[in-house]
Amino acid sequence: MRIRLFSTITGLALLLTSGPLFSQQLDYRSLEKSIQEVVKKVAPATVSAHSYDTTQQRITGPTFSAVVVSEDGLILTAAHASSPGGVYQVIFPDGKTVIAKGIGSISENDAAIMKILNKGKYPHAEMGWSSSLTPFQPTISMGYPANMRQSGHPLVRFGHVNESTLFPGFLCNTALMEPGDSGGPLFDLNGRVIGIHSRIWQSMDANYEVPVDKFRKYWDALLSGKFFLLDKLAQEQKIPEMPAAYAIKPIPALENMPQNFSALLASVENSSFSISSKKVNESLDAMGTLIAVPNAAANTSYIISKSSIVGDDAISISQKNKTYAATVVSRDSLKDLVLLKVNADLGNGIKLFQQTENNGSFTAGKFLLSATGSEPAMISVLSSPSISFIPRNGNTWLGVTTTDRNNKVYIDHIPAYGKISGAKLKTGDRIVSINGVKVNNSDDYGWEIARQLPGSMVTLKGKRHGFGFSRKLQLQKQAFSGPNEKHPAEQFEGGKSVRNDSFRKTFIHDARLFPSDCGSPVFDSEGRFMGINIARVCRTSSVAIPADEVKAFLQSALKI
């Protein structure tokens, strides 16, 4: 059986550093473990940043990414994001915020250095060497893509070095990027920085990095506090010789899937169905996931899919050239799930009710397999270890920002120029509930706000100095500059799902799904059912509803 691999792995004639070693026939478990170890090692040094007005204590520019490379706080980033003398707020994955200053930059090669002003010892990553990189060497990308608007852990994407002459002097690789990632790090399998995210092109494989050797070559110039338009205007210096331990060793080309995935492919294929239907006069295509339902009637099977791409008319499901009629049993508009019933025995579905909760199995860098409409499966990596909500395009907000302390939510900032400033809320107020729904953390609070439309009235109950209060407040439309439809990040193959937001619980991975691939099951490398693909959100990310949420939907729909 052929497996469709996204191009980070296709034709993988891997050339690996001498750190992680793999057998002659590449062991994906060893590769997966190496990726996860790198993520754990360097994620604490991968930061987000934005220009910041320290007198007004407010953000004054878009978020970009960066990486700390010294204990005392030297930061590598992109020149189009940072400028000499600029002041920036830097946010670490653990929530710690510091102030940094732009030191130097070179526009032509898009390299810039910042320095943290707060004294301290900071988590940092080691700088590698880019001159020795060869096509098909694995790469691990981290950053904070703007379309995901996630806080906390940087999103992980996996790829490999490829060849491109489009932007001479830049390193091209297949790990996906988009605006917001700019300035973030690209790592090798030893966790060394080999590039800094710079730009993309329309091809999904066209992700360009500032080679880390550019920083080495102009290190003193970048620390001089000056802006250089062109490389030739900056003083060059000799790049230190790469240690012998960094030498690259080739391993044989990978032509077929490793043996340790072969058994899993049958499970992926057997539990996946193609769905066609009609909605008014529109023809719709989707994927569906076969679920084993306890005590189901004879010759009755159940399939779950993405509701918004499954109509109510002419529903048919197919697999291995066999087609069956299906009917809708239930829909959940918030989860965007639909349950279909088929009067036929479709075989063994996913035994959802026999597996334990899987929230503890989310490890960034884990390999995932998703069924697709055109090929048996697609490999991706889990981008974040957390279960996150995807808000409604960031359009609705209350006008305050919050922080979590001891399982409680507090207001930590109220813009002086915002409409909410006159609503008799104060910094330090605890938010207890929104419209009667208790909120225990900022995710709970964010979801209850995001699921409302701008202009809606909500009832906020809170506490101040131990005394309760209630406020009726009108939600605002957040001033958010939406994506530029002409930007390459918005023109990727297949495009976004029409419904790609307002999901309460999802996990993020870097599969290059088409919208019609949604509804398909997701498995991890050990064959565990992780959830159902629910949306292609942006160039870098697809999201899936986790298994426990799928189970809750099925229990509600069938009163199990």
Image (cartoon, grey):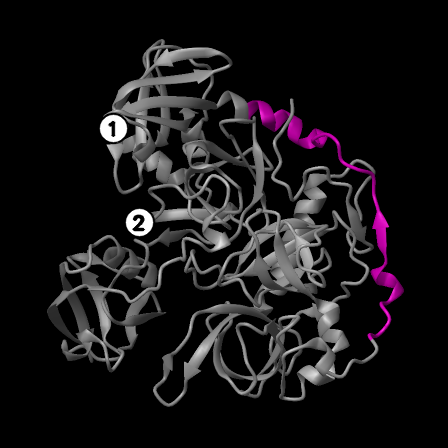
Residue 528, compared with residue 220, is above or below; it is above
Q: Residue 388, image x and y in percent?
A: 40, 53
Q: Residue 417, image x and y in percent?
A: 24, 80
Of labels 1 and 2, earlier in sequence is 1
- The quadrant of the picture occupied by the C terminus is top left
Frontmost residue, 182 versus 553:
182
**What amino acid is labelled 1 in the image?**
Ser
What crowding class fits label 1: few (fewer than 14 Cα within 10 Å), some (14-19), or many (20 or more)?
some
Residue occupying the point 34% across, 87% down: 56
Residue bearing mark 2 = 502
Query: Is 253 inside the magenta-drawn segment?
Result: yes
**Residue farthest right in this picture:** 244
Q: Is residue 222 left or right of residue 435?
A: right
Residue 338, compared with residue 404, is above or below; it is above
Residue occupying the point 51% across, 30% down: 371
Residue 505, compared with residue 25, is above or below; it is below
Frontmost residue, 8 versus 333:
8
